[in-house]
C-alpha cells in the first residue's frame, strides 16, 4: 500500500557501496524482494529466503516475471558456490534468528576475497528493539522477542574471518502522508492484532516520535545498527 515508506532505510543500507555493473549480490533474508527496486538493473541479484510465506509474497510482488530469482533455503546451507559473490546484504531480517553464526560462516564462504557484507538490524537495547519487544510484543497475540545485534555479533563475524570496516547506528525516517497512515502501516508490518491503527499511532509518537518533513509528509523516527565487513583478500 505504501511502497515508498522505507525508501530511506534501503538507501541507508546501500550508503557508500560502489556497485559495479554485473556485480553478484545476495539479499538474505529477502522478505518481499523489495531491495531490487533500489539497485541498478545491471546487477546479478539473488534473493534468498527461509520462509515460504515470504517467498509467496515475493512472487506476488514480482508478478511481471522480470524479477531477479529467489531461492528457498536454510541459513546454514546457502545455494551459492564458494567465492562467487561480490556483495551480501541483510536488512532487518535476522533478529528472529538466535544463532546467526552458521549464516555468517556461509556468507563468508560465498563471498569472493575482498567481497563485502552489510548487515543491518536493530541494536540490542535501542529504542527500535525496545519498541518491538515492548509495545509490539504486548499488542500482538504471537508476541515479539528478538535477538538483536551487539558487540558479540561483531566478534562472531570476526571469528568467521571477516574484517570489520565499520559499525554504527544510522537514523532515518519511514515516510507517510500522516501519522495515522504510519499507524496503519506498522499495524500490518508487525501483525499488531490487539490495537487499532490510532492506538499504534499514539504508541509510535510516545516511543519513537515523528518529524514534519519539508515535502509536507511526516517521518517516523527509525534506527538500525549497520555493520560493514570485508572478506580478506588473503586468508589469515
Image (cartoon, rainbow, N blue to C red):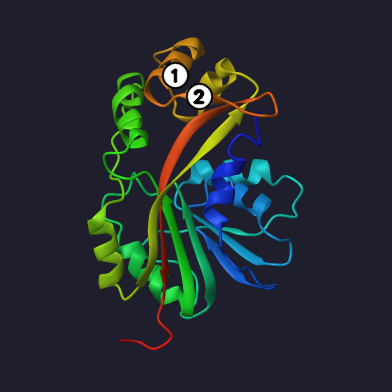
Which residue is label 2 attached to? 210
Relative vertical location of residue 28 with respect to residue 175 in this rendering, above or below: below
Q: Is the Cβ of the residue at disc 1 closer than 8 Å to that at disc 2?
A: yes
Q: Is residue 47 left or right of residue 122?
A: right
Asked whether 206 or 53 is in front, the reply is 206
Rendering coords of residue 95 (x, y %): 35, 45
Mark toward the start of the polypeptide (1 vs 2): 1
Q: On the rendered image, what quadrant is the N terminus found in?
A: top right
At 66% across and 36% down in the image, what residue appears?
3
Asked whether 128 or 86 is in front, the reply is 128
Which residue is label 1 attached to? 205
Rendering coords of residue 43 (x, y %): 68, 67
Rendering coords of residue 206 (x, y %): 39, 18
Asked whether 54 or 114 is in front, the reply is 114
Residue ranking furthest to the front? 214
Asked where in the image residue 107 lies, by quadrant, the reply is bottom left
- Residue 4 is tagged as none
At 32% across and 49% down in the image, what residue appears?
97
Q: Is residue 190 left or right of residue 87?
A: left
Amino acid at each position: 500500500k505504501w511502497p515508498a515508506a522505507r525508501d530511506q532505510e534501503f538507501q541507508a543500507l546501500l550508503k557508500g557501496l560502489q556497485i559495479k555493473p554485473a556485480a553478484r549480490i545476495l539479499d538474505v533474508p529477502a522478505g518481499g524482494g523489495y531491495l531490487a527496486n533500489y539497485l541498478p538493473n545491471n546487477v546479478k541479484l539473488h534473493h534468498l529466503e527461509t520462509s515460504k510465506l515470504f517467498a509467496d509474497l515475493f512472487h506476488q510482488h514480482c508478478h511481471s516475471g522480470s524479477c531477479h530469482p529467489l531461492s528457498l533455503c536454510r541459513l546454514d546451507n546457502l545455494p551459492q558456490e564458494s567465492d562467487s559473490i561480490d556483495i551480501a546484504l541483510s536488512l532487518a531480517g535476522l533478529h528472529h534468528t538466535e544463532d546467526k553464526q552458521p549464516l555468517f560462516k556461509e556468507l563468508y564462504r560465498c563471498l569472493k576475497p575482498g567481497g563485502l557484507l552489510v548487515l543491518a538490524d536493530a541494536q540490542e537495547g535501542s529504542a527500535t528493539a525496545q519498541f518491538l519487544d515492548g509495545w509490539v510484543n504486548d499488542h500482538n497475540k504471537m508476541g515479539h522477542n528478538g535477538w538483536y545485534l551487539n558487540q558479540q555479533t561483531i566478534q562472531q563475524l570476526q571469528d568467521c574471518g571477516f574484517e570489520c570496516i565499520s559499525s554504527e547506528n544510522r537514523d532515518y525516517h519511514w515516510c507517510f502522508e500522516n501519522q495515522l497512515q504510519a499507524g496503519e502501516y506498522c499495524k500490518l508490518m508487525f501483525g499488531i492484532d490487539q490495537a487499532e491503527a490510532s492506538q499504534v499511532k499514539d504508541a509510535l509518537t510516545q516511543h519513537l516520535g515523528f518529524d514534519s518533513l519539508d515535502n509536507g509528509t511526516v517521518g517516523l523516527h527509525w534506527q538500525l545498527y549497520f555493520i560493514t565487513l570485508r572478506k580478506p583478500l588473503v586468508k589469515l
